[in-house]
Amino acid sequence: MGTNNAEIARLQQQADEVVEVMYANVKKVKEREDKLQVLDERAEQLQEAGKLFQKTSKQVAVQEASRNRKWKIILGVAVGLVILVVVVVIIITTSLKDQHLPPQSDAVPRLATTTAG
């Protein structure tokens, strides 16, 4: 009977070891579940941050396009004004020159030549 008691004690010890291993496995599974939950929460936060970034970047792109458009218009108006000023100056100077020049005849002036002889 001593053999049976020893066998039962050995089996009980193995069962206790299996129970301890199972408890350890359950504990590890719970820890993994907690870690996965934390990772899931972080992923959701990153996704929300990504959406916010995308929205903000679109707003910035629209603002920059508007600002660029404004500067192109200002530059175009400035160039147009410079061209207008140049044309007006050319017209005025040409007009003033025409008023101060004596009328020209259609005849070609001839040089007086002396003949020796």
Image (cartoon, rainbow, N blue to C red):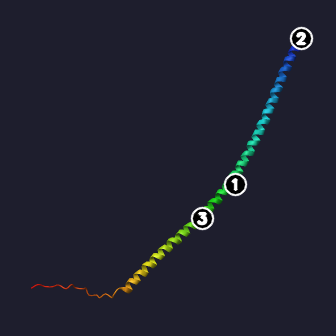
Frontmost of labels 3 and 2 is: 3
Residue type marked 3: Arg
Q: Which of 47 and 4 lies nearest the eye of the viewer?
A: 47
Image coords of residue 63 (percent x, y): 63, 62
Q: Is residue 48 left or right of 100 when viewed as pictured?
A: right
- Residue at 52% over, 70% down: 76
Please tell me whether mark 3 sits on a helix, a strand or a loop.
Answer: helix
Q: Residues within 10 Å of mark 1 (few under 14, many from 20)?
A: few
When the figure is inspected, residue 24 is found, relative to residue 2, above or below; the finding is below
When the figure is inspected, residue 18 is found, relative to residue 88, above or below; the finding is above
Residue type marked 2: Gly
- Residue at 38% over, 86% down: 99
Q: Which residue is mark 3?
A: 67
Separation (CA) of disc 3 from disc 1: 22 Å
Question: In which image quadrant can residue 73 be found?
Answer: bottom right
Mark 1 or mark 2: whose residue is earlier in sequence: 2
Residue type marked 1: Leu
Q: Which residue is mark 1?
A: 52
- Residue at 75% over, 45% down: 41
Q: Is residue 93 left or right of 11 when viewed as pictured?
A: left
Query: Residue lying furthest left in this view?
Result: 117
Image coords of residue 6 (percent x, y): 87, 14
Image coords of residue 84 (percent x, y): 48, 76
Please tell me whether mark 1 sits on a helix, a strand or a loop.
Answer: helix
Q: Which residue is mark 2?
A: 2
Q: Which of 61 and 116 lies nearest the eye of the viewer?
A: 116
